[in-house]
């Protein structure tokens, strides 16, 4: 079984960056390719209870779009 991976922390470390971390994206691209190569279908969640601490301390949670 794969360890619990924190995807958001990998490609958006603080959670409010404008551009993703390319190395983090490549890591998961390679990981998913390897899973598929072995007949494993990855299951992805957008939000699974955790969020970067910076988002909690700076915004109180997920940022809301400015009106």
Image: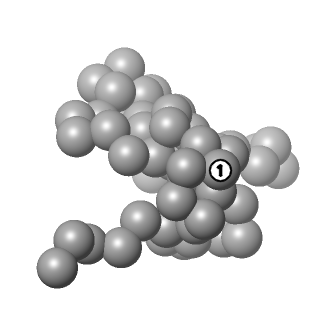
The percent position of residue 18, horizontal first and vertical second, equals: 22, 40
Viewer-proximal residue among 19 and 6? 19
- Placement of 43 over or under 20, stated as above or below: below
Quadrant where the C terminus lies? bottom left
Residue ranking furthest to the bottom: 67
Residue at the spot x=80%, y=43% of the render? 3
**Residue placed under numbered mark 1 in the picture:** 57
Q: Is residue 57 left or right of residue 25?
A: right
Residue ranking furthest to the left: 67
Viewer-proximal residue among 16 and 66? 66
The percent position of residue 37, horizontal first and vertical second, equals: 45, 44
Viewer-proximal residue among 33 and 50? 50
The percent position of residue 11, horizontal first and vertical second, equals: 42, 36
Residue at the spot x=32%, y=38% of the render? 17
Secondary structure, mark 1, is helix
Viewer-proximal residue among 19 and 33? 19
Residue at the spot x=77%, y=49% of the render? 4
Is residue 42 visible in this depiction of the protein? no
The percent position of residue 57, horizontal first and vertical second, equals: 65, 50
């Amino acid at each position: 079984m794969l360890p619990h991976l924190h995807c958001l922390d990998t490609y958006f470390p603080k959670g409010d960056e404008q551009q993703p971390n390319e190395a983090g994206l490549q890591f998961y691209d390679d990981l998913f390719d390897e899973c598929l190569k072995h007949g494993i279908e990855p299951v992805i969640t957008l939000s699974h209870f955790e969020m970067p601490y910076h988002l909690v301390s700076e915004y109180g949670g997920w940022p809301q779009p400015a009106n």
